[in-house]
Image (cartoon, rainbow, N blue to C red):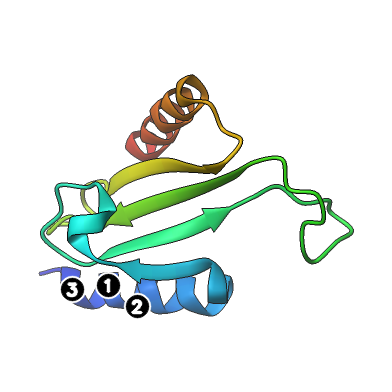
């Protein structure tokens, strides 16, 4: 039998180690998700391959997610929000693409 809680916790620990300051836990009521569990937000922005940090940030997006009770056997809940320069239609298209990719896994 799968221990979903343990798998989810190990995944969060790995993401925190990789993303460091770019991932934060957010309150469920502020996440915009219909979540029962913990919610997290990852800040995404483009950067040049040669640079550690972006210098001129044209867009920034917040990807919010929460594991479902049976994650990883079912996809997580996802949300996107523009932090800078992203149009609503572009966010909608990006979210559709993300959900397609998650469902294909």
Secondary structure, mark 2, is helix
In this rendering, position of residue 28 left or right of residue 105 = left
In this rendering, position of residue 46 left or right of residue 74 = right
Q: Position of residue 69 (x, y in %)?
A: 12, 59
Secondary structure, mark 3, is helix
Q: Residue at x 47, y 50 (%)?
A: 62
Q: Residue at x 82, y 56 (%)?
A: 55
Asked whether residue 28 appears in the rendered view, the answer is yes
Q: Are marks 3 and 1 in contact (CB under 8 Å)?
A: yes
For the residue carrying disc 2, how many other residues have a C-alpha within 10 Å: few (<14), some (14-19), or many (20+)? few
Q: Position of residue 49 (x, y in %)?
A: 84, 54
- CA–CA distance in space, label 1 to label 2: 5 Å
Q: Are marks 1 and 2 in contact (CB under 8 Å)?
A: yes
Q: Residue at x 32, y 35 (%)?
A: 103
Residue 10: mark: 2
Asked whether residue 71 appears in the rendered view, the answer is no
- CA–CA distance in space, label 2 to label 3: 9 Å
Say which quadrant the N terminus sits in.
bottom left
The foreground one among 68 and 52 is 52
Residue 94: mark: none
Q: Earlier in the sequence, mark 2 or mark 3?
A: 3
What residue is disc 3 on? 5
- Kindly give the residue lying farthest to the right in the view shown: 50
Q: Position of residue 89 (x, y in %)?
A: 47, 20
Residue 7: mark: 1
Secondary structure, mark 1, is helix
């Amino acid at each position: 039998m799968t221990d979903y809680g343990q798998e989810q916790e190990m995944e969060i620990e790995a993401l925190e180690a990789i993303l460091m300051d770019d991932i934060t836990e957010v309150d469920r009521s502020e996440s915009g998700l219909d979540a029962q569990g913990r919610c997290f937000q990852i800040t995404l922005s483009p950067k040049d391959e040669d640079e550690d940090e972006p210098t001129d940030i044209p867009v920034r997006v917040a990807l919010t997610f929460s594991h479902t009770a049976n994650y990883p056997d079912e996809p997580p809940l996802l949300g996107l929000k523009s932090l800078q320069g992203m149009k609503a239609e572009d966010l909608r298209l990006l979210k559709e693409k993300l959900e397609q990719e998650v469902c294909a896994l």
